[in-house]
Image (cartoon, rainbow, N blue to C red):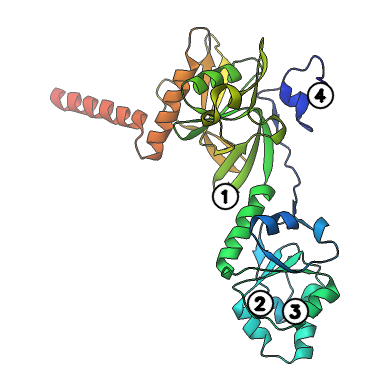
Amino acid sequence: MNIPPRRRNFAVAYFPGFVYNSIETEVLATEQERSYPLSQIVSELNLDILYPSRDYDSVMITSGDVHRPGLQLAGFFDYFDPTRIQLMGKMEASYLEKFPADERIRRLDALMAQKIPAIVICHGADFPDEVFVSAERGDITVLSSEQNTSDVMSNVIRVARRVLSPSITRHGVLVEVYGIGLLILGESGVGKSETAIELLKRGHRLIADDAVEIKSTDFNVVQGSAPELIRHYMELRGIGVIDVRQIFGVGAIKDRQNIHLVINLEPWKDGAVYDRLGINEQTVSILGVEVASLTIPVRPGRNLAVILEVAAMNQRQKFMGFNAALEFTKQINRHLDEKTKHRL
């Protein structure tokens, strides 16, 4: 591998498409178009192939949702999304059985004409032969599963959305500290990787260094991971690239992690006003999800690893319903109220 000269970070050198932006925290905020091979979903979910289309190996799934075509079998196609995988179970089979063979063919042909990516027959339902006749005429893949329709639906959505969810890439470091995902951002050279190394020595885990791929995996949840090309690697100025898994062991790495707290590291500025109490909680929007945020000033002598450990534990307490800043404020207010009463 040829190492590009005079690069400022190895994400730029080895991560195709990564854009280095020296303004603020070097953020690449371009959502990426994604697709996923149908054959990969079939493999992951152990689906049986009853009829493969001629282009089966090249069919790409672009929607993280699925659909049950009950209304479409009745002839209603308004607002129908043909990019979704179609699931049919015992209910659809029973409905089709009510019609003669030629009517079944007509209704199924109308569905196949939408160029859907695939049909999955669930629950081991016994469908009439017309399904396969129509699928062959429309060249649509037919799959099957012994699982019930609801389970197949949730599994397909889980697999598809893991890959197809909205995604951005940010220049930073993602670590897990006491179960809390910390996304560390800051200017190049501020000490993000060095802080992460100290956290690894203290028993915490690395998810990504330099380039963090972030996806919205669920409602109000964003998850980070490393690009496959640089997964488990870190760059330390003066040393170079290291393999975290080989040096610290498999217990020091993790493939993906939900992001609970964004840490912005910035050089200490004399005269700047920094939060001393923590009542006013700051948030940052990532893919439409509001994530708690802290700004930590950096200067020689500050043990950032310990500070971030405390930040993680404090965030964990907040999730459990305890906010130290609010409790302290209540205590001060009670004290002042008591002094006021004594004066009266």
For the residues labelled 2 and 1, the Cα–Cα distance comes to: 27 Å
* x and y, in percent, of residue 119 in the image: 72, 69
Residue beneath label 3, please?
A: 131
Comes first in the chain, label 3 or label 2: 2
- Judging from the image, what secondary structure is the residue with disc 3 in? helix
The amino acid on which the numbered mark 4 sits, given as a three-letter code, is Met
Q: Residue at x 82, y 56 (%)?
A: 58
Q: Seen in the image, is 146 located left or right of residue 275?
A: right
Label 1: how many Cα within 10 Å (few below 14, some 14–19, many 20+): few
Residue beneath label 1, please?
A: 218
Nearer the observer: mark 2 or 4; the answer is: 4
Q: Nearer the viewer, residue 44 or 208?
A: 44
Label 3: how many Cα within 10 Å (few below 14, some 14–19, many 20+): many
For the residues labelled 1 and 4, the Cα–Cα distance comes to: 37 Å
Nearer the observer: mark 3 or 2; the answer is: 3
Q: Residue at x 71, y 57 (%)?
A: 63
The amino acid on which the numbered mark 2 sits, given as a three-letter code, is Gly
Residue beneath label 2, please?
A: 70
For the residues labelled 3 and 1, the Cα–Cα distance comes to: 34 Å
The amino acid on which the numbered mark 3 sits, given as a three-letter code, is Val
* x and y, in percent, of residue 232 in the image: 63, 29
Comes first in the chain, label 3 or label 4: 4
On screen, 98 above or below 270? below
- Judging from the image, what secondary structure is the residue with disc 2 in? helix
Comes first in the chain, label 3 or label 1: 3
Residue beneath label 4, please?
A: 1
Comes first in the chain, label 2 or label 4: 4
Q: Residue at x 85, y 61 (%)?
A: 55
Q: Seen in the image, is 269 located left or right of residue 5?
A: left
The answer to the question of whether label 1 and label 4 lie on touching residues, with beta carbons closer than 8 A, is no
